[in-house]
């Protein structure tokens, strides 16, 4: 059982380090969104940028604190901290499953909001709209909202036989979804298992035989 305790400690500390790495990644993503917001703030008809960015930054702070709690709980084998860690990880797991369900349920609403904003920018394509549309096309390496033929119906683009310089001829603007959520869920489940093992094994009373093996005295 000592091996299980040591292994659980090591795994829990490793999970805590992963939380810190995830927090750093979330800080980077949230900061990047705030830094580049002015490039696309007029392209969407809904608050699809700053609100998620704020949530991402808040999640980064939470993950950082959770990593600290995980390290302390693993090193001290504190039952209260282990119970708190297990409960928080369980809540996060449930929240992620709920968020995935909501994202799937409202995917059409989000897609429509983004498409409406991009369609409006493509039709106008002047002033700020032009700069932001060019930025999005360069960054995403795409052309138009759905494909390059969208530019033929753009009122703001005079030359209907060509496309803007920021455009590249690709089939669509979508990219492959390589979501890290599944890996994070595995890490959280591992953390929950390790915290349970340490919770059950922490602060056990170890007996030693006094007066020889036949004395029958233990402390």
Image (cartoon, grey):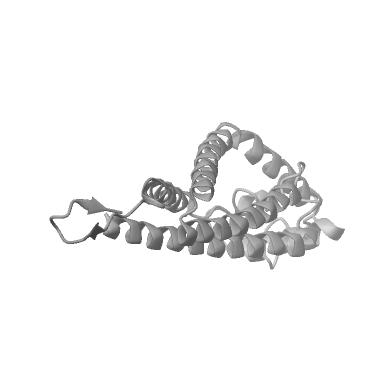
Q: Decide if residue 168 is in sight here.
A: no
| Horizontal arrangement in the rendering, residue 181 relative to residue 45 (left or right) | left
* Percent x, y of residue 162: 67, 61
The residue shown at (66%, 49%) is 150
| Horizontal arrangement in the rendering, residue 37 relative to residue 86 (left or right) | right
Q: Residue furthest bottom?
A: 165
Depth check: give the residue in front, 67 or 6: 6
* Percent x, y of residue 137: 66, 61
The residue shown at (38%, 45%) is 200
Q: Is residue 98 above or below residue 203?
A: above
| Horizontal arrangement in the rendering, residue 177 relative to residue 60 (left or right) | left
* Percent x, y of residue 10: 39, 63
Depth check: give the residue in front, 147 or 100: 100
The residue shown at (75%, 60%) is 34
Numbered disc total: 0
Depth check: give the residue in front, 209 or 158: 209
Q: Quadrant of the N terminus?
A: bottom left
Q: Is residue 96 above or below residue 7?
A: above
Q: Quadrant of the C terminus?
A: bottom left
Depth check: give the residue in front, 86 or 56: 86
Q: Decide if residue 118 is in sight here.
A: yes
Q: Residue furthest right?
A: 127
Which quarter of the figure has residue 33?
bottom right
* Percent x, y of residue 91: 54, 39
Q: Residue furthest top?
A: 105
């Amino acid at each position: 059982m000592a091996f299980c305790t040591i292994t659980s400690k090591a795994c829990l500390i490793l999970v805590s380090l992963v939380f810190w790495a995830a927090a750093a990644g979330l800080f980077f993503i949230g900061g990047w969104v705030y830094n580049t917001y002015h490039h696309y703030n007029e392209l969407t008809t809904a608050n699809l940028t700053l609100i998620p960015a704020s949530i991402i930054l808040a999640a980064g702070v939470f993950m950082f604190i959770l990593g600290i709690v995980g390290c302390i709980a693993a090193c001290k084998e504190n039952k209260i901290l282990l119970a708190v860690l297990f409960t928080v990880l369980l809540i996060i797991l449930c929240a992620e499953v709920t968020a995935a369900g909501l994202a799937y349920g409202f995917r059409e609403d989000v897609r429509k909001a983004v498409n409406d904003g991009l369609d409006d920018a493509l039709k106008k394509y002047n002033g700020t709209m032009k700069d932001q549309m060019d930025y999005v096309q360069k960054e995403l390496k795409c052309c138009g909202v759905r494909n390059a033929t969208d530019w033929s119906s753009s009122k703001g683009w005079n030359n209907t036989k060509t496309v803007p310089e920021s455009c590249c001829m690709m089939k669509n603007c979508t990219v492959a979804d390589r979501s890290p959520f599944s890996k994070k869920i595995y890490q959280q489940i591992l953390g929950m298992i390790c915290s349970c093992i340490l919770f059950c094994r922490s602060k056990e009373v170890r007996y030693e035989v006094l007066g020889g093996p036949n004395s029958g005295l233990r402390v």
